[in-house]
Amino acid sequence: MKAFTEYLYFHTKKRQELLNITGQVEEALSKSGINEGLCLVNAMHITASVFINDDEGGLHEDFLLWLEKLAPFGKDKYKHNLTGEDNGDAHLKRTVMGREVVVAVTKGKLDFGPWEQIFYGEFDGQRRKRVLVKIIGE
Ligand code: ZN
């Protein structure tokens, strides 16, 4: 069995952004030389997500509006922020959108369902953050 590890780095301009990272994960898979196996992609920070969905702009606006209703930004809204932080909302948004995805690798390609793409969800950005790509197989 082979194992391949790569880190992707993101530094978003806005506090919240959803980025399609499918191409970067496909590049890592290509470098790995693995044809059959599993590809794990996870955010290494507790205020960012990795998730799979459709690359459709209206849907992405819907996600951000929905998350803002569930967990609106606000320094005095969360007990977590009593520690001096202002990102209580971002921890909650990250938990709803998920930490990681696992995609099957078949014949050297990410084996997606129709319209599936991999996204990095940033909820407390404007600083450098990491995503892990770990691919195992043969
Ligand atoms: Zn925090």
Image (cartoon, grey):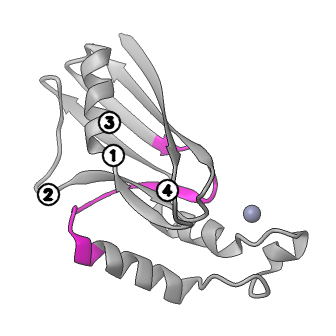
Residue 29 x, y percent position in the rendering: 28, 25
Circle 4 residues within 10 Å: few <14, some 14–19, many ≥20: many
Q: Is residue 60 left or right of residue 83?
A: left
| Residue in front for this viewpoint, 40 or 64 | 64
Spatial CA distance of label 1 from label 3 is 5 Å
- Residue at 32%, 16% in the rendered image: 32
Q: Counting residues from the N terminus, which is met first, the one under dot 2 or under dot 1?
A: 1
The residue pinned by badge 2 equals 115
Q: What kind of residue is marked 3?
A: Gln
Q: Counting residues from the N terminus, which is met first, the one under dot 2 or under dot 4?
A: 4
Callout 4: SS:
strand
Asked if residue 14 is positioned above or below residue 41 in the image, the reply reads: below
Toward the top, the furthest residue is 1
- Residue at 25%, 32% in the rendered image: 26
User: Which region of the structure is painted magenta?
Assistant: 42-59
Spatial CA distance of label 3 from label 2 is 17 Å
| Count of picture labels | 4
Quarter of the rendering containing residue 58: bottom left
Q: What kind of residue is marked 2?
A: Trp
The residue pinned by badge 3 equals 24
The residue pinned by badge 4 equals 49
Quadrant in which ligand 1 is drawn: bottom right
Q: Is residue 20 left or right of residue 84?
A: left
Query: Cβ–Cβ below 8 Å for labels 1 and 3?
Result: yes
Q: Counting residues from the N terminus, which is met first, the one under dot 4 or under dot 3?
A: 3
Q: What kind of residue is marked 4?
A: Ser
Task: Give the mark toward the camera: 3 or 2.
Answer: 3
Q: Which mark is residue 21?
A: 1
